[in-house]
Image (spheres, rainbow, N blue to C red):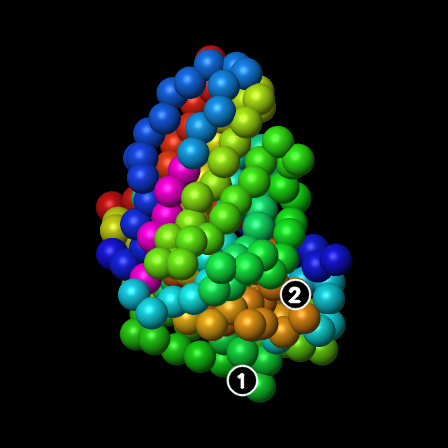
Amino acid sequence: GENVEQHPSTLSVQEGDSAVIKCTYSDSASNYFPWYKQELGKGPQLIIDIRSNVGEKKDQRIAVTLNKTAKHFSLHITETQPEDSAVYFCAAGDTGRRALTFGSGTRLQVQP
Amino acid sequence: DSGVTQTPKHLITATGQRVTLRCSPRSGDLSVYWYQQSLDQGLQFLIQYYNGEERAKGNILERFSAQQFPDLHSELNLSSLELGDSALYFCASSPRGGTGGEETQYFGPGTRLLVL
């Protein structure tokens, strides 16, 4: 089955800096890569996703890049703010599998 | 707010007991997924239902079962509970779920289960 590895497990940045979280996946059939943000006591919230026919996608301060050849994808957050502090999860899915496979999560702390 | 609702928010029970967790998907969504989140295991897929039928199974224990009703709400039943079943249980929904793995899933707020 699919295996998704996520790094780093914790990340601390200063407000205004950029943050990058990286994930690798094992199944070349995976073609859907969402990112979720989970705040304390809440469920995961989709923040951005990318499909395999696209190499990069941006939404304001958030961007995701995908390298299908290397089987890795990354989340980039620019101009970080304290409210960006949360746990971020990457995931991978494909047509054949019925569910998403999640990475282990990255705890992002933005220091004011 | 994702539009997915889960009840109860918290549940405290004893080992050996049985509990039922409830999930209502977003309006119009046909698929419901159940995930377990524990500290050392991350988010683990348990089971998926699509329009009332079981579609996929993940790492779901035999002591656990689920169903989806005609109104599309779903229930996850956990029986013979053990200390290790303490975790957050999330429900997610998606519009079709025919494929599931490539469809956006929207998560509910979760049910925190504590087994003493």
Would you place residue B89 above or below residue A81 in this image?
A: above
The majority secondary structure of the magenta stretch comes to strand
Report whether residue A40 is seen.
no
Lateral position of residue A82 relative to residue B80, left or right: left
Crowding near the residue tagged with mark 2, few <14, some 14–19, many ≥20 C-alpha atoms within 10 Å = some
Q: Position of residue B31 (x, y in %)?
A: 46, 63
B109 horizontally vs B16: left or right? left
Q: Amino acid at mark 1?
A: Val
Q: Position of residue B100 (x, y in %)?
A: 55, 67
User: Is disc 2 placed on a helix, strand or loop?
Assistant: loop
Q: Amino acid at mark 2?
A: Arg
**Residue nearest the observer in this picture, A88 or B113:** B113
Residue B22 located within the stretch drawn in magenta = yes
The foreground one among B50 and A91 is B50
Q: Nearer the viewer, residue B104 or A103?
A: B104
Q: Is residue A61 visible?
A: yes
Instruction: State the residue position of label 2.
Output: A97
- Residue at 71%, 77% (x, y): give it: A69
Q: Which residue is mark 1?
A: A54
Residue in the image at 49% along x and 59% along y: B52
The 10 Å Cα crowd at callout 1, few under 14, some 14 to 19, many 20 or more, is few
Q: Over which residues does the magenta segment extend?
A: B21-26
Relative to residue B11, is residue B105 depicted above or below? below
Asked if B53 appears above or below B108 in the picture, the reply is: below
Reading the chain from its start, which is encountered first: label 2 or label 1? Answer: 1
Residue A79 image offset from top left, x and y in percent: 30, 63
Quadrant of residue A55 within the rendered picture? bottom right
